[in-house]
Amino acid sequence: MIIDGKKISTEIKDELKDQVAKLKAEGIEVTLAVVKVGEDPASAVYVRNKEKACEYIGINSKKIEVPEETTEEELLKLVDDLNTDPAINGILVQLPLPKHIDENKILLAIDPIKDVDGFHPVNVGKMVIGEESFLPCTPAGIIEMIKRSGLDIEGKECVIIGRSNIVGKPMAILMLRENATVTVTHSRTKDLPEVCKRADIIVAALGKAKFVTKDFVKEGAIIIDVGMDRDEDGKLCGDVDFDEVKDIASAITPVPGGVGPMTVTMLLVNCLRSVELNK
Ligand code: GUN
């Protein structure tokens, strides 16, 4: 089975559209502020996709673009203004930020009740102990797409490749919350293909084109590809060698059209959740 992230995310967006219409009927507008610093080309694409998704379900997006030279103090001031603006429900600062700005400092400045990315330490902590919070969009989208494909997580061996704060680490926590047995692997892991071969579910989030080959995959495993890479011909591909792995896996996500659309959709889910929290 090819897990169609685009189709699943459209289903969810159509559900959200109805919720937005109901809020509008009550006189409630939802507004997401998206802050982009500098001219990173990948960030420009991600921000555009987020704006389009907001438009699709009928929520407002306020894009704030500031130049590469913006200082940390200026960005902190901007975040603070958005924190106190009652018309703003959710705040997203697109990462990565320029090198002279301390990313953690900026994420810490976002009011946790407007933190639709789920990156503030308060929300990360709540996620870890299982309290209601904003969940990071990519890992939350992966759980949602597995469930909506009718696949079980409970009791499964899940191997995650990559330990970033945005994907690998929160993915481990959310898989644990679903009662999977979780292994987190990284660049110093010994015998990575052997470890991955034990997995019923592999989540590849390391950022290397076609890194996961058939030598990593057990017959019937579920393969989730978080990669957004370019192959030797400059073509968009994932961290998984799709052609080599697709016939061994029982289910696999494509790139593009897999995890990517789910990430954007979970951001919209979080924006609607922020309306509840902001009340
Ligand atoms: N850069 C790459 N992924 C993300 C994300 O999910 N949120 C933000 N803010 N920046 C990102």
Image (cartoon, rainbow, N blue to C red):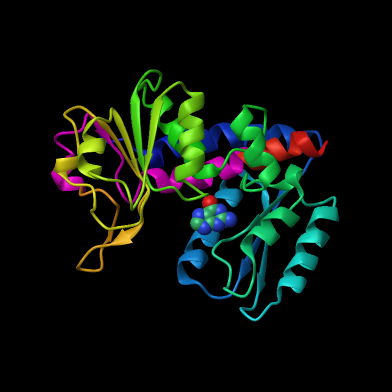
The one nearer the camera, 223 or 270, is 223
Q: Residue 86 location in percent, x, y?
A: 85, 50
Is 133 covered by the magenta stretch?
A: no
Task: Give yes or no for residue 253 being in the magenta stretch.
Answer: yes
Asked whether, in this view, residue 277 is left or right of residue 170, the answer is: right
Q: Is residue 190 visible?
A: yes
**Frontmost residue, 169 versus 261:** 169
Q: Residue at x 55, y 60 (%)?
A: 47
The residue furthest top is: 155
20 vs 189, left or right, is: right
- Measuring from the top left, give residue 45's x and y in whole percent: 48, 63
Left or right: residue 81 versus residue 53 is: right
**Quarter of the figure with residue 2:** top left
Q: Is residue 191 above or below residue 44?
A: above
**Residue drawn at point x = 71 percent, y = 72 percent:** 72
Up the image or down, 113 lies above or below 234; here it is: above
Task: List x then y, in percent, for residue 241.
Answer: 20, 49
Q: Please state which of residues 278 and 131 is positioned toward the viewer in this rendering.
A: 131
Pick the quarter of the image with the N terminus. Answer: top left
For the C terminus, the image quarter is top right
Magenta residue span: 242-269
